[in-house]
Amino acid sequence: MKINQNVRHFASRKALELPVVSDLVKSKLVDLHTRIFLEKADETHRDDREERLDAFFDATMDTYLAALQQGAPEAEAREITHIQANFDFYNHGWTEMMEFPSDELDDHYDRYREFFERHGIAIEDPLGEFAPAGGIPDAPSTPEKLDEPEHPYAEGGFADDVYVEDEEGNVHVGGQDEPADVSVTDAPGVSDEDAEA
């Protein structure tokens, strides 16, 4: 998968691991991800999906931290959460929101199979053990879109590794090293500026 990576992603990582600001940053990151993906959804379905997306992305923050704690680089930990989201989008027939084509689902699963199996994550169960005890809100599916899926925002051909596009538009395989001058104040929710997912 191809994802963006800049100083804000590293700042968010730091902030999520701190006791005081983590809740604030987590809430802001959930809001950002929900907004970004709802903008990709058909306008008539946005309201129906918002509550589920909020809860889903909240749960994936725990996945992200677990992946980091188990030694994944920042880009891979974040990619894992995006793959989880794409599994859920596929299961609901929300193909217009997917970041990679549905025929690459198995390839993305296989790259992180060890992590996914360790935590009970499967294509049909995207959150696995990270699902909250009470579950997350459901939202109407559009299974008819799976017959001839359209992926206007998907980029295929990036299933063999994590590809990171930096702020200058350069693509790095495997991600970038953390910059030396990362400050928690660069994380969304800590300052007034927004970040991209």
Image (cartoon, grey):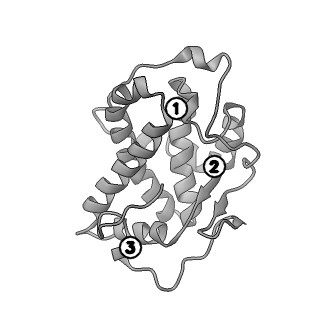
Residue at the spot x=38%, y=37% of the render? Answer: 53
Using the rendered image of the protein, determine whether residue 101 is visible from the camera's viewpoint: yes
On screen, residue 19 versus residue 128, left or right, reads left
Residue 1 percent across, percent down from the top left:
66, 50
Q: Which residue is mark 1?
A: 89
Q: Which residue is mark 3?
A: 186
Q: Secondary structure at mark 3?
A: helix
Residue 113 percent across, percent down from the top left:
64, 45
The answer for how far apart the CA atoms under marks 2 and 3 are is: 29 Å
Foreground of the two, 163 or 111: 163
Residues at discs 3 and 1 in contact (Cβ within 8 Å): no
Foreground of the two, 43 or 134: 43
Amino acid type, label 2: Tyr
> Residue lying furthest bottom in this view?
180
Q: Secondary structure at mark 1?
A: helix
Q: In terms of image quadrants, where is residue 124?
A: top right
On screen, residue 135 versus residue 70, left or right, reads left
Q: In terms of image quadrants, where is residue 153?
A: top right
Amino acid type, label 1: Phe
The answer for how far apart the CA atoms under marks 1 and 2 are is: 18 Å
User: Which mark is nearer the camera, 1 or 2?
Assistant: 1
User: Which mark is nearer the camera, 2 or 3?
Assistant: 3
Q: Earlier in the sequence, mark 1 or mark 2?
A: 1
Q: Secondary structure at mark 2?
A: loop
Residue at the spot x=33%, y=28% of the render? Answer: 47
Residues at discs 2 and 3 in contact (Cβ within 8 Å): no
Q: In terms of image quadrants, where is residue 73?
A: bottom right
